[in-house]
Structures are given as structure tokens and as C-alpha cells.
Amino acid sequence: MSLSSLDSIQIVLVGTTHPGNIGATARAMKNMGLTQLALVNPQRFPAAEATARASGAVDILQNAQCYDSLPDALHDSQLVLGTSARQRSINWPVLTPRACAEQALQATGKTSIVFGREHSGLTNEELDLCHYLIQIPTNADYSSLNLGAAVQVVCYELRVKALAAAEADSETEAEPPVSAHEMELFYEHLQRTLVDIEFLNPEQPRHLMRRLRRLFNRAQPNTVEMNILRGILTAVQRKTPRQ
């Protein structure tokens, strides 16, 4: 996974009242590397205030897609996540922004993250189009977030998750796990060492060794890590008196 995975994520604003919030959204998106903005029935757009608040993210505004309805904006989305600050009488599966980022970046197709009107959010009918509900864990005594700030929080979590995934992929590509044959040589070495230090009964090795196999198989050590493990075992054997 790379930062290009952010290209498949669309931010959708529904019924935005203030054009400045559209500009703030564009700025938040560009800060975090997102490019797809969809607007559903904005009250005023294009608008000079949106351009001013975008502060250099004018390209996001210029490429924004406008739609007459939310279903039109979501027509090619595989995963839809809706945001809400209010508790609803009907229960939707609820995610934090961090969990939302994980879901969005695991999706194999386009993901839309939908933000509602400044004062009333999304209607229940609009939430019916969403697979999950996102709630930002704000201060319970003052939970109201500006639209641009809410978009910034979600976009930040998306970027952090994408960066972490890209780094993990890079490490995996650079240092693949050792082969099954090398693992078997390690297990033989490990068993001999455990017998030498009298931690393992050579007459009944299976139970302990099976658990250790499960442990190291889950870890999937790479070549560098395996060399460290084998080096530790060798050092232990050197310090162990021979019977």
C-alpha cells in the first residue's frame, strides 16, 4: 500500500451553507494528500469566499464534482462512511476516525466519506446510504466541530494510516521472511539449546516446541532477525557447561 491509496477516497459535503467551509475542506484535503471532493447541493459554489479559504488548494475546488443528490455522488462507491455528532434513535455501526481510516484503506474500490450540513448534519435517509457512522470523540460538554475541522481530523487519520501501511509494506519488501527450510534449522538449533540449558526435557519435547513453533511462525522473522536469534542461541551454548 502507498499514499496513492488516498486517491480512491472521496470527501462528500452535503448541503453546505457557507462557501468558506468548502474552501476550508479543500485546504484540509490538500494538506493530507486527498484530491477528490464532491459537493451535493451547496448553497453557493463557486464563490470567492471558498477560494480565499482554500488558501492555495484551488485545484481541489476546480476539480470538485457537483451533484443534485447524494445517491448520484455515491454511484460508484464501494464503501460509504457518514459523519454525525448526534446520537441517533436508530443504531448504526459507529467508528472513530482512526477506525474509519483503517476501513477506508482496506477497501478495494472507491470510498466516500460524507459530511452533512453545518447545523443539522445528515438526515436519517442519507445515513441509510452509509455502511458505517463516524463519530469524532470530542469533549462531551462542547462537541460541536466546525465542518472544516471535522474534515481535517478525518483526513489526518487517513494520511497517518496510509503512511504507516506504506512503511510496513516497504519493510516487508526489503526483508522478506526466511524460508521454511531456514525455520526448520532454527527450530533444531533452538531445541538443542533448550536441552543444553535443561529448560527442555529431551524425552518430552513436543508440547513446548509446538508452542514455540506457533510463536515464531506468527512472527515470520526475516534474515536479519533470524541471524540475531541464531546468534543468541550460539552465545548461550558457548556459556553452557557441557555434560
Image: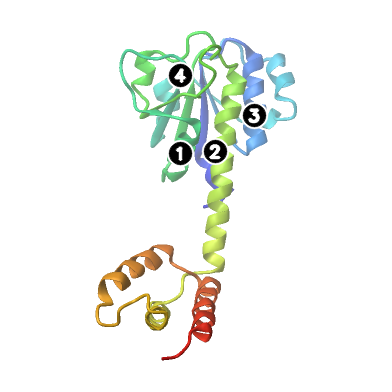
Mark 4 Cα within 10 Å, few/some/many (few <14, many 20+)? many
Residues marked 2 and 1 touching at CB (< 8 Å)? yes
Q: Looking at the image, is mark 2 or mark 1 earlier in the sequence?
A: 1
Q: Of helix, strand and loop, which one carries label 4? A: loop
Mark 3 Cα within 10 Å, few/some/many (few <14, many 20+)? many
Q: Can you see residue 89? A: yes
Q: Looking at the image, is mark 1 or mark 3 earlier in the sequence?
A: 3
Q: Going 45% across and 90% down the picture, which residue do you hit?
A: 242
Question: How far apart, in angstroms, are the residues tagged by discs 3 and 2?
Answer: 12 Å
Question: How far apart, in angstroms, are the residues tagged by discs 4 and 2?
Answer: 18 Å
Q: Which residue is mark 3?
A: 28
Q: Give whichever of 214, 194 is nearer the camera.
A: 194
Q: Going 45% across and 36% down the picture, which residue do you hit?
A: 99
Q: Of helix, strand and loop, which one carries label 3? A: helix
Given the image, on which type of amino acid does mark 3 rest?
Ala
Q: Which residue is mark 4?
A: 84
Q: Which residue is mark 1?
A: 104
Q: Which residue is mark 2?
A: 158
Question: How far apart, in angstroms, are the residues tagged by discs 4 and 1?
Answer: 17 Å
Task: Tell me where residue 174 appears, x and y as whole percent.
Answer: 57, 67
Q: Looking at the image, is mark 3 or mark 4 earlier in the sequence?
A: 3
Q: Is residue 29 left or right of residue 101?
A: right
Q: Looking at the image, is mark 3 or mark 2 earlier in the sequence?
A: 3
